[in-house]
Image (cartoon, rainbow, N blue to C red):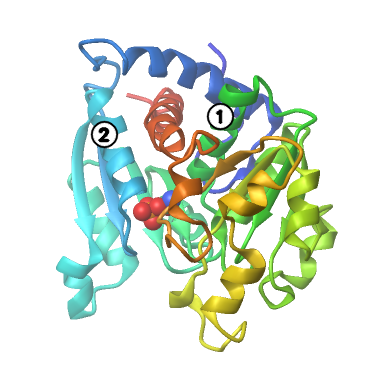
Amino acid sequence: MDKLSVDHLLGIKYLNANDIDLIFKTADHFKEVINRPIKKVPSLRDITIANLFFENSTRTKLSFELAEKRLSADVINFSAGQSSVKKGETLIDTVNNILSMKVDIVVMRHGNVGAGVFLSKQVNAKIINAGDGTHEHPTQALLDSYSIREKLEKVKGKKILIVGDILHSRVALSNIFALQLQGATVKVCGPTTLIPKYISSLGVEVETNLKKALEWCDVANVLRVQHERMDIKYFPSTREYTQLFGINKQILDSLDKKIVIMHPGPINRGVEITSDVADSDQSIILNQVENGVAVRMAVIYLLAQQIKR
Ligand code: CP
């Protein structure tokens, strides 16, 4: 059987093109499964998975839990807000207590960059990074590329624009790595204050004029302004941000082609994207969410195959 080249899913930067191909082929199978009347397979009946969320989440948390249940794994959920972390318990103590309950796979979202890598060196379980601070969100990038592949038949050769708060986005970095591995070209667009200085070293061009950027691309992946990660003011006002970088129907209709619109969620309607665009037939936002379950089933299944029993 084909195997992943990695022992954990800590970031897209640790994967190669064959890994992504294998994940997508496996996800194709699971997408067919979750569209059956009985949406469940017995593949992971002997596997226990802990979902550890130290930061808020709606989509990723629910999507992982559903993916695990569709694979028949036993699932335990942990949210830091209702836990003994509030009483001062450390990450390692928290995780070791959970692992002593015989957990095989840990899915973790954490506010600190590198939290998944740290954990993978400390504990004897498979680790899946569900977002570490402003660093990586690998399953989001995988489901994004999978959704582009589904909509446009392939990712190779496509021009993908990432618009918005690139500086604070783990989705942007993981998408850049994933798209480039598959042969796409990536540009970013946003206020210069929200574009990291190192972006050109990743082979990514910057376009600060939204209309020009949209005219260039096949797909625009629109990101949320992450106010919660900002300790200073990066642009004068939300109104000005929306005027210069907001995606609305008027600007899309002014293009001479119909581009695909994506957003990882959660959406700030009326800020980075208007409702008529988010809910339009150009948008594949809900397809991204649907595909997230199949892609996460694939990642969990492939990592679980490596567990020695
Ligand atoms: N896309 C994403 O990570 O959304 P959540 O923060 O709701 O999980």
Towards the viewer: 307 or 154: 154
**40 vs 54: above or below:** above
Q: Secondary structure at mark 2?
A: helix
The mark found on residue 108 in the picture is none
Tell me what residue is drawn at x 24 percent, y 74 percent: 89
x and y, in percent, of residue 170 in the image: 55, 58
x and y, in percent, of residue 173 in the image: 64, 55
Towards the viewer: 216 or 185: 216
Q: Quadrant of residue 124?
A: top left
Number of marks: 2
The mark found on residue 146 in the picture is 1
Q: On the picture, is 301 further left or further right than 44?
A: right
Answer yes or no: is residue 175 visible: no
Q: On the picture, is 72 further left or further right than 29?
A: left
Which residue is under mark 2? 66
Tell me what residue is drawn at x 62 percent, y 53 percent: 250
x and y, in percent, of residue 244 in the image: 66, 69
User: Dot 2: few (<14), some (14–19), or many (≥20) neighbours within 10 Å?
Assistant: some
Quadrant of the frame with the C terminus:
top left
**22 vs 194: above or below:** above
